[in-house]
Image (cartoon, rainbow, N blue to C red):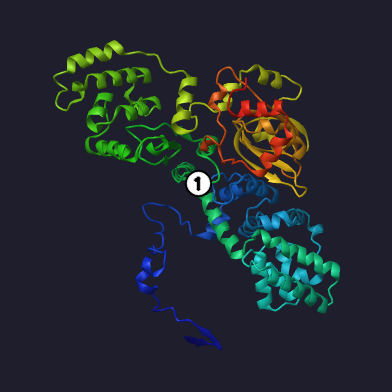
Amino acid sequence: MAKYSGLSLIDMKNYSLPAGNRVDAGLNLRQIYAVLPRNSKGVRFDIYNYEMLFKDEPTKRIIREGNTIGCFYIESPGMRSLLKKLSVDTFEMLTAASSIIRPGVAESGMMQEFIARHKDPARRKYLMPELELHLGETYGVMIYQEDVLKVAHHIAGLSLEEADLLRRAMSGKMRSQKMMQTLMERFFNSCKEKDLSEENSRELWRQIESFAGYAFCKAHSGSFALMSFQMAYLKAHYPSEFISSVLTNQGGFYAPAVYIQEAKRLGLKVLLPSVNESTYEYAGKDDKVQLGFMAIKNFSYNSAERIIRARKQNGPFLSLSDFLIRTSAAYEESALLIKCGAMDCFKKTRPALMRLLDIYFHRRKILEKGSGDLFIDETIKMEEEIATDTQYSDEEICAIEYETFGYMLRKHPLEFFTGSSSLKTFAESKSPIILAKDLPKYSGRYIKMMGWYMTSKRIRTKKGEIMKFLSLEDLTGTFEAILFPKTYMQYAEYTVSMGPYLIEGMVDKEGGNNLIVNKLEILSSEKIKLSMQKDSVENNYYGDVETVTEEEMFISHTLDNEKLQKAYMTSTGLAS
């Protein structure tokens, strides 16, 4: 124990983890890793150079415009909307945004107040003059746990110990109602002793009480903001490597399909898996994203490693027979590779390769090592006889991709609906369909849009009513469709579909990326069957899993038989 200016400090110089860091000693920490190396292996930047990150204009622009899909903590629809509302492009403001999005601040109404005060300095009025001294940085709004300490101690007059007890209680770390009641009484008594009015005391308590929703401490928000800046920098300067890493890590807030479409919006070319190019993971280089074998459902890691090892030992595969001989791949996995395009490098159509595969496995002697020369003439003759230039149709290829990867690469689902009669009628009307990229130009105006499902969220309002947020995308960008309770009750049975949604509504003046829905319908198509559209309960590709909740049970009881049947038909793909 060292002494410094009257303080007792712990000397950590010779400290080591107890009991040799054994798991049986009650420790879950198995290993302490070294600090990540900097500027190694040709990396031309230091991701820990925060001054460089905070000054980088492309990084700041991505954050300010909310183009943060894939970036840790700031990629959710709500967060991206908040970034645009606040025009966030500094570390300090991103730290604040990371905290006010939390339930405690958001549900108390203080998030909206913070946004209003940030945009309009005239609204930065303080409940009492002392608050400006302690909460001036956040415009008089409590957004961090430390703000509770400041107000409880400096304004209400509680001791630091009492203030910290109150902070812990408000952050959900104290379950004793008796203690909570004692703290509340102590708070109001202390306010009275400091001659605070009852009105001001109750308003301070209301704001503090909102932290029951788990607000962040400032250090927590700051650490998230640092990492978010790092992610935004990587996305701005190394988009293919960044998106590939997000996909390899199994995504973040969204399902893989959303990141695939984001890659395309960034101008990247997304390549199918290839037996001659792919590794197990996704790989990004220059302006390309190469799908790895991990993208293929039901394709084993061992099979992928066997292909990669054979390729390293003897070079690229020259033909289907060469691939089968060198890898000893089974029929099912070989067929999977052919159908999804991983053998397009052999310059034959996929139906032709499937025919060859059937022949090779029927005449197994052709695949026996050392028998190639003996059966060469017969093999060449058969390959010529079954050759075909016929290729799967776009619809068939997209169906295979959907089944194999969980998303489509050849076309976006919306492209199958551009020729439908419903869309033509919509487009030829006096109010044409507005694209997502043009949405900010129509602030406060009534418009029509079309979108495909990304993810969704249901919430209960303060009145106990249910509303829903739909995150949608078109070929140019993403947007949020907000269904308030009255509208949601009218169209709830349609929102279990993947879309595409044809919607009408007013563009939110406050959040230029939000459309307040007035009308909603599902567009049908002759080219692609709705049986391919699966609700997220059945398929993880399309965003969050929507489990049956109390709200849904409530809604189901309010629907008549006709609407219940319509909801079922829509969700199962049986609707026409």
Q: Residue at x 58, y 65 (%)?
A: 219
Q: What element carries label 1?
A: helix
Query: Which quadrant of the structure image shows residue 102?
Result: bottom right
Between 440 and 560, the one nearer to me in the picture: 560
What residue do we see at 26% from left, 36% from top? Answer: 311
Q: Which image quarter: residue 11?
A: bottom left
Rendered residue at 36%/32% (across/down): 274
Dividing the picture into quadrants, the one containing residue 155 is bottom right
For the view shown, which residue lies furthest in the top direction? 385
Position of 301 relative to 400 (above/below) = below
Left or right relative to 245: residue 253: right
Confirm whether residue 319 shows in the render: no
Q: Write down the residue under mark 1.
A: 237
Where residue 7 sits: x, y (%)? 55, 86
Residue 1 percent across, percent down from the top left: 47, 85
Side (left or right) of 364 relative to 20: left
Q: How crowded is mark 1: few (under 14 residues within 10 Å), some or many (20 or more)?
A: few
Q: How many marks?
A: 1
Residue 368 seen anywhere in this rendered image of the structure = yes
- Residue 35 position (above or below residue 564): below
Q: What residue type is labelled 1?
A: His
Q: Is residue 195 left or right of residue 462?
A: right
Q: Nearer the viewer, residue 301 or 266?
A: 301
Q: In which quarter of the image is the C terminus?
A: top right
User: At 37% across and 13% down in the image, what residue appears?
Assistant: 389
Q: Where is residue 485 drawn, in percent x and y?
A: 75, 40
